[in-house]
Image: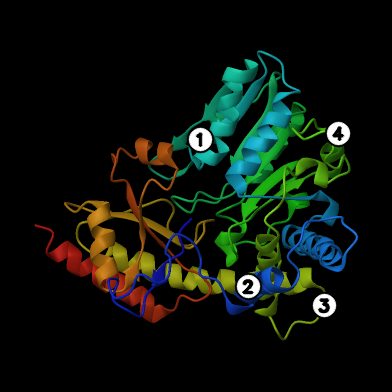
Amino acid sequence: MLILLFGTRRANVSRSRPAIVWTQVPRAVVEAVSDYLYRHNANTHWAYPTSAETDELIEASRSALADFLGATPAEIIFGANMTTLTFHLSRALGRTFEPGDELVVTELDHHANVAPWQALERERGVRVRVARMMPETGTLDWDGFERLVGKRTKLVAVGAASNALGTITDVRRAAQLAREVGAYVFVDAVHFAPHELVEVAALDCDFLGCSAYKFYGPHAGALFCRRGLLSTLPFPKLLPAPDAAPERAETGTQNHEGIAGAAAAVNFLAALAPSVAGTRRERLRATFDALHARGAALFKEMWEGLSGVEGVTLYGQPPGARRTPTAAFTVGGVASTEVARRLAARGVFVSHGDFYAATVVERLQLGEEGLVRAGCSCYTNAAEVERLIAGVREIALIRN
C-alpha cells in the first residue's frame, strides 16, 4: 500500500526528497535505529554487554509487535519483509503437504500472498485454487470461494485488505470455511495493519504477516505464527541454529536495527493516544479508533471530490463500506504514470501501476498502466486532500 504523501517542495528540487513508496518515519523511529547502531550493535547470545543488550532489545521488540497484533511475544518471527517471510513459511508448510493437496488463494491479493503458494505446485505437486474477485465491486465472490474449499484443502491464504483497492475482506468468514475442513489460515495484513488494529484471535488465523514500513517503521517484516505450529513446523534452518521457538523460524543474522525501529513504530502509534491510560494494547486500540474515524472522513472528501471530476473512474467500494481510506482511480486519456508524474510536479506524491496486485489490474482490464492510488495516513489533512483533487481536476481538463 502507498500512503499519500504531500511534499512541501517541488519534486525536482532535491534528490533527498521524501521517499514515496512507504509511510514516512517519525523521529523516534530514526533515533531507535541510530541508537542501536551507535550504542548496541552486536550479534546475539554472546557473553558481553552489547550482545546482551541486543538480546534484550529483540525480546522487547517481540513484545511490542505482539501487542500490535494481539499475540504473545513467543509467536512473533522477524524477517526481511512479509514477502520473504511468506516464502519461508510456504517452504515449511510445503514439507507437510502431499501431492493433490489443495491451497486456496484469491484474485484480490498482492502476489506476495499468491506466488509463495503457487511455488508449491511445482515443488510439492499441490493444487492452487483461486477465489475470484468481482470487478464491479472489488470484493470477493463468496459463493465461488465456498465451492473451492473442500476436504482436500490444506491452506486458505487471504488478504485482510486489498493494497490496490482498499477492500477489507471478511477474514473470519474465510477462516470459518478453512476450519470446517481442518485447513490452515494465512493472512496478509500488510495493507490492513496501518488502518485497523489487528487481533489474531478474532481473525482466527494460524499465521499473519505484516511489514513495518507500512506503519511508520523501517524495512523489517514480522510474522505471527500460532505457538503450537511454531514449535513443530519443519522450518528450513541450519543445524547449529537455535531450535526453540520463535528463533527456530528465523534464519541468519537478523536486521537488529530494523527490529528496533519496528518496535519504535508501534510505540509511536501507541503514543498518539496520550490521554489514554492503560496497557500499550489499550493505547493502540484508542489510537486506531481515532485514526479510523479521521481516515474515513478524509477518504469521503477524497472520493467525493475525485468522483466529481469528469473523466475520473474510481474503483472499489465507496465511503461507508468496509474498506481502508485508499482510493484507486484512473483519468481517462492519461496514462497512470503521467498522472503520477504531473501530480508530483505539484508536490502531491501518489503511486501508479499494479502495486504487485497484478491480478486485480488484469481483472479490471486496465493494462500495463494500471491504477493511480492515493490514501490517508496519520499525517494527511483536508487541505492536502484538496490539493490532490485540484491536481487531478487540472490534469483531466488538459488531457486532450
Mark 2–mark 3 distance (CA, rounded to whole Å): 22 Å
Viewer-side label of 4, 1: 4
> What's the residue type where badge 4 is placed?
Thr
Q: Position of residue 367 (x, y in %)?
A: 28, 39
Please name the residue that numbered disc 4 is placed on.
232
- Between discs 3 and 1, the one toward the N terminus: 1
- Between discs 3 and 4, the one toward the N terminus: 4
Please name the residue that numbered disc 2 is placed on.
29
Dot 3 and dot 4 residues touching (CB under 8 Å): no
In the rendering, which numbered label is found on residue 278? Answer: 3
Dot 1 and dot 2 residues touching (CB under 8 Å): no
Mark 4–mark 1 distance (CA, rounded to whole Å): 34 Å
> Which residue is drawn at the image coordinates 21% and 68% (left, top)?
393
- Quadrant for residue 308, please give it: bottom left
Q: Residue furthest front?
A: 48
- Between discs 2 and 3, the one toward the N terminus: 2
